[in-house]
Amino acid sequence: MNIILFGPPAAGKGTQAKRLVSERGFVQLSTGDMLRAARSAGTELGERVAAIMDSGQLVSDAIVIELIEDQLDTHTDAAGFIFDGFPRTVPQAEALDATLAKRDQEIDCVIRLKVDEAQLLQRVTKRYEEQGREDDNPETFVKRIEAYNAQTAPLLPIYAERKRLYEVDGMGSIDSVAKEIDEALEMKSGGEKPGFFAKLFGKK
Ligand code: AMP
């Protein structure tokens, strides 16, 4: 099963993805983590993307699509993939569909963590203090939210139209968010039961 964890920065996608990895054996593909790893390793790619990341903008589609394709080729035996922070633009979503189709796969489920943007700022300020990620500073974080709303949120109606979108309240505790995600995945793997479409995010 291929799942996209969807939501603005700091919505808790990474936390939930890691849990799904340890509980279900899925492979997490976080483009943000991959780019940060490239920077830490001091690669040419890392150097190329550093300033863009620190400014809160998105790196080019071609870069992240290549990173994802490399990973899909590496983990050919995966039980499923959790896409975390990817796709973030319409061209990325189209490239993902195309590359999965080549492998006879598709996106089965898009889980949107719905969050209150004002409260996110508090979450991120805490993360900034604890982890010191440059792009978590409040000014840059606002730019990241703007990028999300302008370039990433337009994907929601596309996945809704394809009946792939589930909404989860992302402001609850880690456990309650996890429970809602599990329920969505059970519905998905158990087939479309009565009431199923009530859970789907049919309209933007
Ligand atoms: P994240 O940790 O997912 O919030 O990503 C951190 C930063 O990496 C973002 O603000 C972007 O600069 C860059 N980035 C991560 N994923 C993508 C993506 N799918 N498309 C473009 N830029 C990305």
Image (cartoon, rainbow, N blue to C red):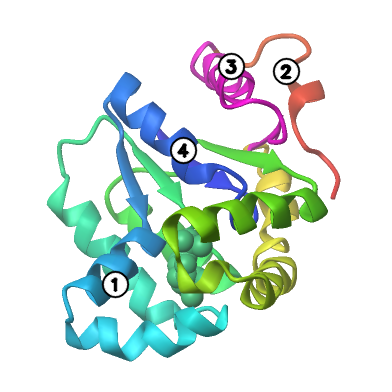
Callout 3–callout 1 Cβ contact below 8 Å = no
Magenta stretch: residue 151 in it? no
69 above or below 202?
A: below
The disc labelled 3 sits on which kind of residue? Lys
Residue 81 found in image quarter: top left
Residue 32 can be seen, yes or no: yes
Could you say whether the residue bearing mark 4 is in a helix, strand or loop? Answer: helix
Query: Which callout, 1 or 2, points to the residue nearer the camera?
Result: 1
Tag 1 and tag 4, C-beta contact below 8 Å? no
Q: Give residue 86's position: percent from left, percent from top.
A: 47, 59
Is 135 situated above or below 114? below
- Residue furthest to the front: 129
First in sequence: mark 1 or mark 2?
Answer: 1
On the image, the x and y values in percent for residue 170 come to 68, 36
Q: Is residue 121 left or right of residue 76?
A: right
- Of circles 4 and 3, which is in front? 4
User: Residues in magenta?
Assistant: 165-190
Label 1 element class: helix
- Mark closer to the chain start, 2 or 4: 4
- Mark 1 vs mark 4, CA separation in Å: 24 Å
| Residue topped by disc 4 | 15
Q: Earlier in the sequence, mark 1 or mark 4?
A: 4
| Mark closer to the chain start, 4 or 3 | 4
Distance between mark 3 and mark 1 Cα atoms:
33 Å
Q: Which residue is mark 2?
A: 196
Is 165 rendered above or below residue 51? above
Q: Which is in the foreground here, disc 3 or disc 1?
A: 3
On the image, the x and y values in percent for residue 122 come to 71, 52
User: Which amino acid, mark 2?
Assistant: Phe
Instruction: Tell me the residue that label 1 is attached to.
Output: 66
In which quadrant of the rendered view does residue 30 lie?
bottom left
